[in-house]
Image (tube, coloured by chain):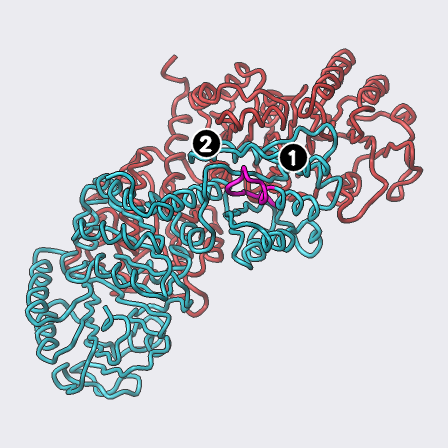
Chain colours: A red, B cyan
Amino acid sequence: MKAFMEPKSVALIGISRKSGPGSFNIMENMLQYGYRGRIFPVNPKAREILGAKVYPSIRSVGEEVDLAVISTPRENTLSIIEDCVASKVKAAIIVNQGYADADDKGKKIQQGIIEVARRGGMRVLGPNTLGVLNNFNGFTTSFMPIGKQRTAVGLICQSGILFVGALEFSGTIGKGIDIGNACDIGFYDALRYLGEDPDIQIIAIHMEGLNQAREFVSLAARVVREKPIIILKTGSSEKGAASAMTHSGTMAGNYHLYKAALQRAGVTFLEESGKMVYAVRTLGNLPSMKGNKVAVITFSGAAGIMISDALERHGLSLSSLAADTIRAAAELSPEWMPLGNPLDIWPAVMKHSTTKAYSIALRAVMNDPNVDGVICVAIAPETPAFSFLDVSETLNEVMEEAPPKPVVAWLYGPNPLEMAKQFESRKRIMTYPTLELAVWALSILRDRHVVVAMKEPEMR
Amino acid sequence: MKAFMEPKSVALIGISRKSGPGSFNIMENMLQYGYRGRIFPVNPKAREILGAKVYPSIRSVGEEVDLAVISTPRENTLSIIEDCVASKVKAAIIVNQGYADADDKGKKIQQGIIEVARRGGMRVLGPNTLGVLNNFNGFTTSFMPIGKQRTAVGLICQSGILFVGALEFSGTIGKGIDIGNACDIGFYDALRYLGEDPDIQIIAIHMEGLNQAREFVSLAARVVREKPIIILKTGSSEKGAASAMTHSGTMAGNYHLYKAALQRAGVTFLEESGKMVYAVRTLGNLPSMKGNKVAVITFSGAAGIMISDALERHGLSLSSLAADTIRAAAELSPEWMPLGNPLDIWPAVMKHSTTKAYSIALRAVMNDPNVDGVICVAIAPETPAFSFLDVSETLNEVMEEAPPKPVVAWLYGPNPLEMAKQFESRKRIMTYPTLELAVWALSILRDRHVVVAMKEPEMR
């Protein structure tokens, strides 16, 4: 994978002469992205592209090429692959669609590519891929603009939009590999690379089909002890599986079998794509949860009830709060207030300041031995008019001296986006747009604890 | 309910002398909100509040009072209720907590209140409530600031935060009734009022406990034929139900029984609070869906597969597109492209303009007799640099001549919030933050069709 992720020289075969918005010019995007290695544009119909000399073919380059990025019509690809092998190119990315994802003709071409590349010892990524993304050295082969965050999140996917729309899918990508049709490089190779990569601490995967399933599952079981792995496996429906054949040309396989095997390996398995961003945020920032018992601090009794319902749905339970915790809450509350878990601190908020009520309550539950994790329902007020209701700073201060238990928050009020940033500023408290997601986040942290706590799987 | 929602005169009993941020002064909020009726502040310890003359008791007002809003310690409430009855006040709202939601003493006081009020012919809302909100005449009894949208959305709830945080819960409230502990006015009365109110076209309900269950269900079955009713019933878990006793002092009842009865009545029943805002947006804006068959237009094959999976989970299916529709897509696409549903228009986007590809595809599926509803996966590009990828205007133009089928969109890319506003500007296309929610939205529109199409329930 090194030739893909950290190439010293790249040939861009079939590079477009057009540039600017809408042209999707790989070279232009690569330069804007900050690539500092050598670039050899190859196009028999051009002499100069973006100020660089253009070569008529890869054979005419005459210098060492680590990686060839090929964006030609499929009719030409096989002979280009032969040229690359002859020129001792180490690795090739085939960008375009129209291979196993398309028709019989495309399948045959893809099969030919694999045979030629294997014989020549060249690895191939794709076809039907945006290629790779490495924010730690400013390299990408994407023809679409993508984010530049140098984060510990590795992404493996079978779709370019998960690169381009990473903000929504995984939240961020530090390094990414789009395996596309996976004719050669597959999930196994990509996971091995990111699993061993010290820059990467968490791995998000979008999976349509899976080759080398047995090897992948056993590799995942090893990697996941050090780094959380989150997998969205699509194609659970008959129609979805059929579409996977025409999208990445891969067999979706038996969804439920994969699901069982991956969960058993310790992977966080997602049923809904919209949860990936929250899974990454949760497992990437919060400590795992050592048990099932959750304390709820809320300014709304109604929300406390909704959270109780959601906890049960996710196999979590409400802690029986210790006497010290109840005592701390009782000092804040009116005498008639029934105190327990959920801890409804609205009467305390009305009596004292919002910040005082929240900080005393959070400190108490964090130090409560009966509590494994905490959900805070906090107000997201308009600032600055209602800043006196903002408890983000206060709660973050409490967290500085708190034991390593996960704290998630659901912010309720007119200003949730700005408040979320403040709550998350020290990465000790994560926020979620719905209370259901906040509860689910704790459930995957509980599952994560089971994975890290067991050195060896107990069941065989 | 009229005395609550449209009072000509209001007495504020136990009104605070403090005003400004953090004081939660009802009178101040009421004035800021725009109430134009008469206000009589009542507080034996004050002579003037916010420039208005203060009365020592309700008996000393000596003028006709439609509504009394009572915020006194619970020890005084019973005698105040007696005074209100003696002064021929038509209706009273008891704001504070500490009644059936608290302890035995509180329960007894609440019982006493009911008896006195019933005997005197005065209706009571609460205790433990923010009261009412009527954006059509600028009236509220909330001591917290709330939104002022004059929309056709009615809300009935048992929690003040659903008033204050309406933006997140139901998206908007035109008129709202917080029944709190529901000692007198309950869901039945509130639904009857909003059901008959011509300003209100859709009703959102947050329900902890339900009295008069039989009457409510049969009323709901009548109202729902004209106006969608969406209910979030909380307390599904044992702990949640127990918390409901200490929150609103109401019995949560048998969750599954209520669920079955309400669904049978034609109500949209929610399991997750986070879905209310999308249910209101969907049922309030889009036409119902006459069948199960959905067309998917996507620029991403991967998203098409995820949507296929989600459709199956929600009991929907992919339409078999008509020959005309396939022909329209074929003219846009490369010859090798396998065409079907989901309709992957990325190759067409690469070959033509994004707007051309989307508008031809949307027009074709909207006119396809095999299609009951449509999901569009569209790009949410940064503007203005990538505005050429923005199809919101184009799709809205297509909708102007399209038959009444629901169209939902999932926007993917770096700029979903701004793009969502543009897509929704004509209220013909609604957008959702995840594809799972977009699919679910179509499923509730299908269920809605079943309700409106059946004049009489078929099963008895």
Near-viewer residue (A246 or B143): A246
Please provide the residue range marked out in magenta: B365-378
Q: Secondary structure at mark 1?
A: helix
Q: Count the labels in the image.
A: 2
Residue named by callout 2: B312
Task: For label 1, count other residues whose C-alpha is less than 10 Å away and answer few (under 14), some (14-19) or many (20+).
Answer: some
Gap between marks 1 and 2, in whole Å? 23 Å
Picture coordinates of residue A87 (x, y %)?
86, 20
Q: What amino acid type is highlighted by mark number 1? A: Ile
- Disc 2 crowd rating (10 Å Cα; few below 14, some 14-19, many 20+) is some
| Three-letter amino acid code at the position of disc 2 | Glu
Write down the residue under mark 1.
B326
Residue A306 x/y as whole percent: 30, 47
Answer whether residue B376 is magenta in the image: yes
Residue in the foreground of this view, choosing between A399 and A119: A119
Q: Taking A5 as reference, is B139 above or below it?
A: below
B202 sits to left or right of B141: right
